């Protein structure tokens, strides 16, 4: 049941056809896991918080650095040296105090990933490296939790949504890791674009409206301002999802 | 057969974000070989030490992503091939 303040706060989105108070209540009951409080994580967490997602767990083990501030908009000058999850939580609570933010200052690893994501309705990949993305992809599939993949580099972005047992997973598309680099180039608008696409997918999934970005890899080219979509299909021999019984089409 | 190849992404050693070339070949593999002849510096990036397409690339034919096994697939005149590297930043 929504309170009077919630009805007013979310009035404009409740007005959206197919959304309604029922959709808002679904958001209020939802639990979303965000892996990373960097560029993508800042955008996703901001828009999920203002949309009224009930519980948002943000996991990151980094501290805020000056070089983060061109894109990680939840962190400000005064936050340099602070834990990213604490810095993010403070801003998100100010944006919407109705939302519960769980800040976990841990590195996501094989040993803790299942425990961290257990009980969540959806996992958002806002990581800054490929090995952890594969780890999250695998955990999402094993625990039957939908997974939103996003990645950025310079003016480029990728996004894809994965419904375990129904749609292609990240490992159906890519297998290896790119040559390691200490740091990657990026401008703040790129994670903002991709993070907002991921937040859109989360909201649509929870509310149950629209067509998800499943079995489609979205490639964003900010320099030419082009979005290109590629059709992907489940690989029956996929190491991550090949063993899952197909549940039906999405 | 004549096809058009698009190489997307930062990983290109060339300055353009998307490198495009008209190529000819009977299969996807042959078209990729022709493409790297035109863009020789991409060869080292696209293929691994065994001469296979690197695992962090996906290849699409007319916007449908294909598997590594399908690289032997024949191409038709006018097909568009896309080479898409994975990216990892966040």
Image: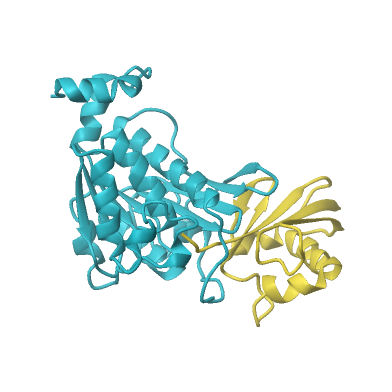
Name the image quarter holding the N terminus of chain A.
top left
Which of the pair A122/B78 is nearer the observer?
A122
Q: Residue furthest bottom?
A: B49
Relative to residue A124, is residue A20 depicted above or below? above
Position of A191 compared to B33: left or right? left
Report the number of numbered marks.
0
Establish if A117 lies above or below B53: above
Residue at figure coordinates x 35%, y 20% from the top left = A12
Q: Is residue B41 left or right of residue A50?
A: right
- Which part of the image, by quadrant, shows the C terminus of chain A? top left
Residue at 76% x, 58% y: name it.
B16
Can see residue A182?
yes
Chain A is which colour?
A: cyan
- Residue A178 drawn at (x, y percent): 55, 71
Q: Looking at the picture, does residue A87 appear above or below residue A223? A: below
**Residue A40 image point, x, y percent:** 43, 53
Please state if B61 lies on the left or on the right of A27 as rendered.
right
* Residue A240 point in image, percent of width and height: 39, 62
- In the rendered image, residue A247, in percent from the top left (x then y), is placed at 33, 43
For the point 24% across and 66% down, the residue is: A105
Protein image colouring: by chain
Task: For chain B, give the colour.
Answer: yellow
The reply to whether residue A163 is visible in this rendering is: no
Q: Residue at x 54, y 48 (%)?
A: A189
Q: Residue furthest front?
A: A78
């Amino acid at each position: 049941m929504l309170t009077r303040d919630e009805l007013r706060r979310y009035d404009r989105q409740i007005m959206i056809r197919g959304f309604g108070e029922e959709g808002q209540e679904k958001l209020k009951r939802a639990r979303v896991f965000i892996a990373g409080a960097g560029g993508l994580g800042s955008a996703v967490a901001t828009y999920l918080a203002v949309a009224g997602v009930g519980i948002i767990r943000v996991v990151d083990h980094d501290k805020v650095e000056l070089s983060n501030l061109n894109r990680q908009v939840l962190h400000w000058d005064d936050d340099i040296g602070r834990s990213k999850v604490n810095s993010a939580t403070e801003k998100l609570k100010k944006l919407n105090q109705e939302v519960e933010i769980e800040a976990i200052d841990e590195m996501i690893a094989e040993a803790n990933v299942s425990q961290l994501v257990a009980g969540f309705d959806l996992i958002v990949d806002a990581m800054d490296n490929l090995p952890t993305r594969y780890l999250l992809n695998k955990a999402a599939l094993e625990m039957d939790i939908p997974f939103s993949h996003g990645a950025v580099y310079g003016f480029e972005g990728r996004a894809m949504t994965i419904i375990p047992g129904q749609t292609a997973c990240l490992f159906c598309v890519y297998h290896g890791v790119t040559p390691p680099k200490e740091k990657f180039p990026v401008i703040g608008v790129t994670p903002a674009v991709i993070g907002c696409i991921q937040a859109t997918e989360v909201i649509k999934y929870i509310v149950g409206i629209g067509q998800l970005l499943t079995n489609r890899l979205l490639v964003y080219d900010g320099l030419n301002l082009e979005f290109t979509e590629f059709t992907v299909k489940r690989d029956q021999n996929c190491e991550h999802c090949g063993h899952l019984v197909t549940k039906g089409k999405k | 057969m004549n096809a058009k190849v698009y190489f997307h992404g930062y990983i290109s050693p060339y300055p353009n974000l998307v490198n495009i070339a008209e190529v000819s070949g009977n299969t996807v593999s042959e078209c990729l070989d022709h493409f790297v002849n035109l863009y020789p510096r991409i060869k080292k990036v696209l293929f691994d030490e065994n001469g296979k397409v690197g695992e962090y690339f996906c290849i699409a034919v007319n916007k449908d992503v294909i598997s590594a096994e399908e690289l032997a697939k024949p191409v038709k005149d006018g097909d568009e091939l896309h080479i898409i590297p994975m990216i990892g930043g966040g």
